[in-house]
Image (cartoon, rainbow, N blue to C red):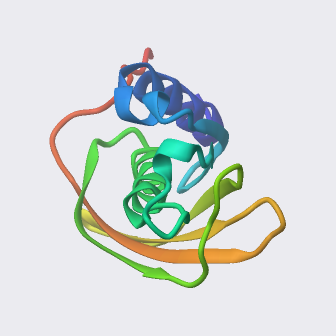
Amino acid sequence: MNRQDLAEAVAASMWNEDEATQALGMTLDEIAPGRAAISMRVTEVMTNGHKTCHGGYIFTLADSAFAFACNSHNQRAVAFQCSITYLAPAFEEDVLTATAEELTVQGRSGIYDIHVRNQDGAHIAEFRGNSRTIKGTHVGLST
């Protein structure tokens, strides 16, 4: 199995078990080794008292893209540190896309940058995630 096919198989396995991502109406738009893009439409229940998208939903979107990217090599990985910088508000009916890119993997640790943009390309947030691999894989490999 080549690296792209493996990333797709891992993503399918993860998607089937990811209740949170599915419940928020997210869609997996792209998957590749070390890379993922996930989109979400901002609904009324996701808005705060300013009538902008609550930052927790933006963080969750970015975190989901991070998870799919850092697990794409079929080694189970979890977040051990994440940070986000909010750059602009998002509003009801905006479609946000979080694109995760692997910067480096050394040993059991990885660093990923996730860019969140709206449907017009406006830069909404920047998220950095540090991953740590744990025991196990997502899909078995036949020989």
Q: Is residue 124 above or below residue 57?
A: below
Q: Quadrant of the N terminus?
A: top right
Which quadrant holds residue 71?
Answer: top left
Position in image of residue 136 (x %, y %): 21, 34
Which quadrant holds residue 54?
Answer: bottom left
Total labels drawn: 0
Position in image of residue 92 (x %, y %): 64, 53
Position in image of residue 32 (x %, y %): 63, 47
Tell me what residue is drawn at x 37 percent, y 34 percent: 20
Q: Is residue 35 above or below residue 123?
A: above
Q: Residue furthest front?
A: 49
Q: Residue furthest right?
A: 120
Q: Is residue 84 above or below residue 31?
A: below
- Out of 41 and 39, give the one closest to the viewer: 41
- Out of 34 and 18, give the one closest to the viewer: 18
Tell me what residue is drawn at x 52 percent, y 78 percent: 126
Tell me what residue is drawn at x 44 percent, y 22 percent: 13
- Out of 133 and 45, give the one closest to the viewer: 45
Tell me what residue is drawn at x 68 percent, y 77 percent: 123
Position in image of residue 68 (x %, y %): 46, 45
Q: Residue furthest top?
A: 142
Q: Is residue 70 above or below residue 25?
A: below
Taking 141 as reference, is 39 left or right?
right
Q: Quadrant of the C terminus?
A: top left
Taking 83 as reference, is 33 left or right?
right
Taking 59 as reference, is 6 left or right?
right
